[in-house]
Amino acid sequence: MYVVIMGAGRVGIALAELLIENRYDVTIIESKEGECSKAAMELDAMVICGTGTDSKILEEANITEADFFVAATGNDDTNLLSSVLAKKYGAGKVISRVSNLEHEEAFKEVGIDKVISPELTAAGFLEKVISRPNVADLTMFGKGDAEIFDMEITNEKLNGKRIAEVSPTDDYIIIAIYHAGKLKIPKPDDVLNTGNKLSILVKKGTFKKTSKVFTGTTLLK
């Protein structure tokens, strides 16, 4: 997985560190020479000194090969323009930080895949958005000790299983199931099938294990 991050500030650097730890290939674009040098020393990543609003810089970053482009600067105009260009060049998904909430709708109108407000620009949240593409939605609680995510069942081994057979566990609990788009509070005898959309409350550090239950081939005992 290849990710291009524009902005080597606190959020950009922290996000890059998290992604590199998870073996993602990362390129950083930063306009300030001092920040470029610092990022090059601290990160095992390609660092390009320039701006993501320059098409030549995006080409140098191989933007056409990027699975994700993240505009993480504190400047909405720069983030918007670079995101539009990244989209134009064919980056897989484009995520942009927006500092002024009044601009959020404009970002969405030009087709940016995910707009992150200042309250949610923690690097850990951005890393989850990138590393969990099969999650429809994500909500974090408190200090990140738990989170709720929406996921569609794709594990055929769950077909015909009663909710009581798979939930609750020490790691998660199914808190909602959707039928024809309508939310239903699950009962122990409700039956699961592929294609069902669920809301699941998960303890910190157990997402990957839990995800495999609903999208993989292994059931928890």
Image (spheres, rainbow, N blue to C red):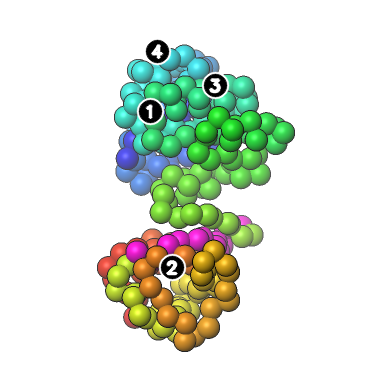
Quadrant in which the C terminus is drawn: bottom left
Give the residue number, with chain letter if any, for mark 3. 81
Name the one closer to the observer, 212 or 161.
161
* Region of the chain picked out in magenta, as a range: 143-154
Look at label 3 and name its amino acid: Leu
Determine the CA span between mark 2 and mark 3.
Answer: 38 Å
User: Dot 1, crowdedness within 10 Å: few (<14), some or many (≥20)?
Assistant: some
| Residue 106 image point, x, y percent | 63, 31
Q: Residue at x 36, y 18 (%)?
A: 59
Report the mark closest to the observer, 1 or 2: 2
Quick check: 67 left or right of 141?
left
Q: Is residue 47 visible?
A: no
Asked which quadrant contains residue 67, the reply is top left
Question: Residue 56: which disc?
Answer: 4
Report the mark closest to the observer, 4 or 3: 3
Name the one closer to the observer, 161 or 57.
161
Marks 4 & 2, CB-CB < 8 Å contact? no
Q: Magenta span has 146?
A: yes
Question: Residue 196: which disc?
Answer: 2
Instruction: List the single residue furthest toward the right.
Output: 102
Give the residue number, with chain letter if any, for mark 1. 90
| Residue 152 image point, x, y percent | 42, 62
Against 35, residue 207 (above or below) is: below
| Secondary structure of the residue carrying numbered label 3 | helix
Marks 4 & 3, CB-CB < 8 Å contact? no
